[in-house]
Image (cartoon, rainbow, N blue to C red):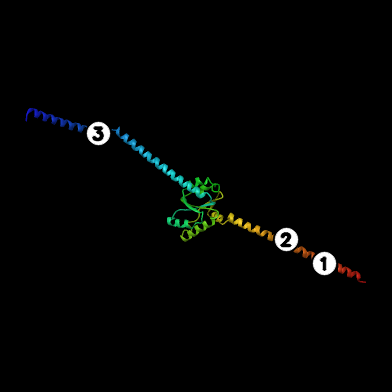
């Protein structure tokens, strides 16, 4: 090989060596940069912002869910005259579905958190009762019954507890009626009261029968007065006849 060719080969070899050294330096600097304290906070800050965003989204979703449930509870309270609760412990989903199918029209059954019951009740005069906190313990299923459905809803629940062997554990905890907190016995007693519709029906029957009874009473009174008058007249005639006969005697 000529000197020029040798020099050219040496130059090319030196260039390749320098290139390898430069590449190694770049790789080394990249590794060191990854270990430097300044690099971690940038990635940490981004991760923190991502976590904060996730937490915010989760909180918003939870709030939206609670708002939806709260509106559902208020919807059940609206138009109801009585609400009462039973413990949810031991109740199975399939049993509850069957129970809902047997409830009277207009009666709703819902498992509601105590805090939501307390909030919703404040918007309804018939349920905004002092002492409501006394019922808000443990996990409960709440019945929301219309006036017409109060009696039958109690009957359906009592039948369910007897048939499922929960007569003792399924006792009614308590309820609210006309802004008054009731115990289990109070709830049953209220359910037996006549409804407005029943009272109106009885009143209509009484009013309808009143003229007949009044006429009968007047007729009876008139007959008594006539009989008394005739009796008096007969008595007076007898007195006059006796008097006339006595005057004719010598």
Q: Residues within 10 Å of mark 2 (few under 14, many from 20)?
A: few
**Closest to the observer: 3 or 248?**
3
* Residue 77, position as x, y percentages in the image: 51, 49
Q: Name the residue under label 2.
A: 218
Tag 3 and tag 1, C-beta contact below 8 Å: no
- For the residues marked 1 and 2, what is the alpha-carbon distance in whole angstroms? 25 Å
Q: Residue at x 65, y 58 (%)?
A: 208
Q: Residue at x 82, y 67 (%)?
A: 235
- For the residues marked 2 and 3, what is the alpha-carbon distance in whole angstroms? 117 Å
Left or right: 249 in relation to 129: right
Which quadrant is the N terminus positioned in? top left
* Residue 135 visible from this viewpoint: no
**Closest to the observer: 63 or 129?**
63
* Residue 20, position as x, y percentages in the image: 18, 33
Which quadrant is the C terminus positioned in? bottom right
* Residue 151, position as x, y percentages in the image: 54, 57
* Residue 53 visible from this viewpoint: yes
Residue 225 position by quadrant = bottom right
Reply above or below: 32 against 192.
Answer: above
Whichever of callouts 1 and 2 sits on the residue coming sooner in the sequence is 2
Q: How crowded is mark 3: few (under 14 residues within 10 Å), some or many (20 or more)?
A: few
Whichever of callouts 2 and 3 sits on the residue coming sooner in the sequence is 3
Q: Mark 3 points at which residue?
A: 30
């Amino acid at each position: 090989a000529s000197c020029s060719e040798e020099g050219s080969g040496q130059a090319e070899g030196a260039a390749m060596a320098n290139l390898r050294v430069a590449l190694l330096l770049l790789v080394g600097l990249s590794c060191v940069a990854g270990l430097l304290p300044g690099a971690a906070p940038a990635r940490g800050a981004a991760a923190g912002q991502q976590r904060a965003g996730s937490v915010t989204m989760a909180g918003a979703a939870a709030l939206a869910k609670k708002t939806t449930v709260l509106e559902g509870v208020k919807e059940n309270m609206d138009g109801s005259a009585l609400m009462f609760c039973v413990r949810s412990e031991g109740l199975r989903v399939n049993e509850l579905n069957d129970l809902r199918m047997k409830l009277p029209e207009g009666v709703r059954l819902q498992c509601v958190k105590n805090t939501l019951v307390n909030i919703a009740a404040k918007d309804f005069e018939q349920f905004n009762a002092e002492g409501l906190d006394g019922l808000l313990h443990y996990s409960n299923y709440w019945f929301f019954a219309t006036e017409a459905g109060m009696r039958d809803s109690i009957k359906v629940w009592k039948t369910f507890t007897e048939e499922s062997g929960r007569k003792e554990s399924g006792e009614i905890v308590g309820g609210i009626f006309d802004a008054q907190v009731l115990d289990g016995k109070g709830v049953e007693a209220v359910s037996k009261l006549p409804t407005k519709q029943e009272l109106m029906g009885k009143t209509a029957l009484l009013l309808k029968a009143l003229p007949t009874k009044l006429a009968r009473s007047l007729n009876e009174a008139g007959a008594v007065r006539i009989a008394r008058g005739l009796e008096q007249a007969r008595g007076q005639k007898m007195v006059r006849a006796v008097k006339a006969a006595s005057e004719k005697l010598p």
